[in-house]
Amino acid sequence: MTKTLHHRACHLCEAICGLTIETTQAEGAAIRITSIKGDKDDSFSRGHICPKAVALQDIQDDPDRLRQPMQRVGDQWRPIAWDAAFALVAERLAAIQQRHGNNAVATYQGNPSVHNYGLMTHSNYFLGLLKTRNRFSATSVDQLPHHLSSYLMYGHGLLLPIPDIDHTDFMLILGGNPLASNGSIMTVPDVEKRLKAIQARGGKVVVVDPRRSETAAIADQHLFVRPGGDAALLFGMLHTLFDEGLTRPSHLPVDGLDQVRESIAGFSAEAMSPLCAVPALQIRQLARDFAAADKAVCYGRMGVSTQAFGTLCHWLVQLINLVTGNLDRVGGALCTEPAVDLVASTSGGHFNVWQSRVSGRPEYGGEFPVSALAEEILTEGEGQVRALITIAGNPVLSTPNGRQLEQALDGLEFMLSIDLYINETTRYADLILPSTSALENDHYDTTFNMFAVRNVSRFNQAILPKPEGALHDWEIFVGLAQAFAAHSGQPLKPTVAPAQMIDRGLRGGRYGDDSTYQLSLATLAHHPHGIDLGALKPNLAQRLKTENQRVQAAPAAILADLERFAALQAPSVDELLMIGRRHVRSNNSWMHNYHRLVKGKPRHQLLMHPDDLASRGLSDGQRVRVSSRVGMIEVEVLASSEMMPGVVSLPHGWGHARPGVHMSIASEQPGSSANDLTDERQLDELSGNAALNGVPVKVQAA
């Protein structure tokens, strides 16, 4: 029996915690995983681990995971050879584009794309040949307002200031629950210890959320806010900072602050209070406390992105950090300096250069809001989408009005999915191409190193050998590209493996010729626990990508959206608003087919304040019917005093008991899909991001 210890990062969430994985192999037998633990010597995560990591073994061994290409024939699935699959894709897509134009083929990329670098480095090697403008991704049900505000203010959508959590004295968290998410657009393993360290050094943690979340429970202060009211709260804070002379000068070159002050003159704390349900005195005191702290940072996450004024929220977060002198400052919000720097190596992006066919939604970075995907398939006419490629995504469960999208998928002429499972979305595909598993793949975190609370670098070697006949995801894209190029007569550029691309990026990056590090893949091979490249430090002034290299505090597109905000009315007192919920054992819909992650107390229920239950004649544990404009579900309700009255909470990613899903454990789980209730018409009109929070619903006995 041979035992081997391996070190790599977990890829199941943004925290990228270091792991020590033990494998054993008996003579003549396959390699087995026998232990997964936190790596105490990891340069970043310091031994921290969450329950998701131990499920890596379950994913590897899952009998439901696809291990060869599968073709759907009627209601049956049968294996197909790789070359035949590639040829079929090329033939079908080329024929559809020849008849209906390039835009008749659409693409959707899911959240796991950023957790595996082969999907990032090589997907466009194939997709670029399609020359379609109908591109969609999970970005627009999540963080699109982050990117758009940074693009408009700093000139690049990936120039995202990150909370300097290890040095701040005051951390204000809106719409985030890092104890459940392990940090998000803030790569921060062991976040609970880091938050408690703020308190231990005399600082303060404040959480603003319609639910007393796990993070709010350990905070020094928790403020309930009405769903969708975060922009009003932030406007009231910013107005107070100006009104009471609480601003500080910034070293950054800034244009437009006077215009901002003038534009928000009517948005006082007193005027904003009815919209956010936070008393004006509390809004003003929060602004004073933030300004009085020596080092403070305001952090907004998914809860403030997925609402009707998501972009305004993130603009205001940046402005509050800026006007208090905490932007680009130690202990405030800082940009990373990653070893492979996508800000330095890519253009800043573009916004609203073209619009979607049906609703005129703006593109960002070449992608349309996914809320528009179903209508682009269902609406007849020139440019109608007739074929779809999904990549590591499950939009039926993760995007608004999932039932409408099911209807759309069922009518496609052709659908290709690159995925490991026959799930709620891929069951509609004509062809599913599965890649190797994560542990059979090497990996480098280009994305999450850009959001990390320290500058770090690590190359993750494959733990297990590549199975005979299997292909890595990047090899699948190369095969598809070769087949499509040959069929359509397009030239195809040569390509190399992702690892070679990363090596070039490391050598050409800021640490490649640094005498201390001389980073390359060879260097990282000698550091299996990763390399800590140092704390974040001020650098934004030098990295600005705006035309005049100055922060744009008052982008015209954002100021134009103030008119829409000014028309906002507070909801009626008897209206219930639905929000989502995150759990540390889940990441969207991916992790419900593993017993270790779904065991224990059920967590699919609708949470509702006891007073709201009583006023509707409902009781704790009862089965209820929840309805919105677009649909109705039935689910168990749970009385919870952690909820703000008038607000209900339902986690998304459940609802696996649909016909044709081949996920045995997930299909047995109770719960319904929250996105059978979310409304594709409810958007942040500026960015097109889905407003998944603040959905008006009715709850009654089932």
Image (spheres, helix red, strand yellow):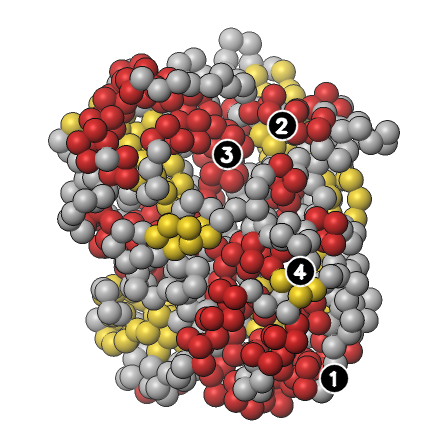
Mark closer to the observer (2, 4)? 4
The residue carrying pointer 3 sits among few (fewer than 14), some (14 to 19) or many (20 or more) residues within 10 Å by Cα, namely some
Q: Is residue 640 above or below residue 664?
A: below
Q: Which residue is mark 1?
A: 245
Seen as rendered, the residue at the extreme left is: 74
Residue 387 visible in the current orientation:
no
Q: Is residue 539 above or below residue 605?
A: above
Question: Mark 4 and 1 residues: CB-CB less than 8 Å, in contact?
Answer: no
Choose the circle earlier in sequence order: 2 or 4: 2
Say which amino acid is labelled 4: Val
Query: Quarter holding the C terminus?
Result: bottom left
Query: How far apart, in angstroms, are the residues tagged by discs 4 and 1?
Result: 21 Å
Question: Mark 3 and 4 residues: CB-CB less than 8 Å, in contact?
Answer: no
Seen as rendered, the residue at the extreme top is: 28
Which residue appears at 54% of the width and 20% of the height?
497
Say which amino acid is labelled 3: Met
Q: Secondary structure at mark 4?
A: strand
Measured as percent of width and height from the top left, residue 195 is found at 70, 62
Choose the circle earlier in sequence order: 3 or 4: 3
Query: How far apart, in angstroms, are the residues tagged by discs 3 and 2?
Result: 11 Å
Query: How far apart, in angstroms, are the residues tagged by discs 2 and 4?
Result: 31 Å
Say which amino acid is labelled 2: Ile
Q: Which residue is mark 4?
A: 551
Q: Which residue is mark 2?
A: 502
Seen as rendered, the residue at the extreme right is: 515
Say which amino acid is labelled 1: Gly
Which residue appears at 18% of the width and 51% of the height?
379
The residue carrying pointer 4 sits among few (fewer than 14), some (14 to 19) or many (20 or more) residues within 10 Å by Cα, namely many
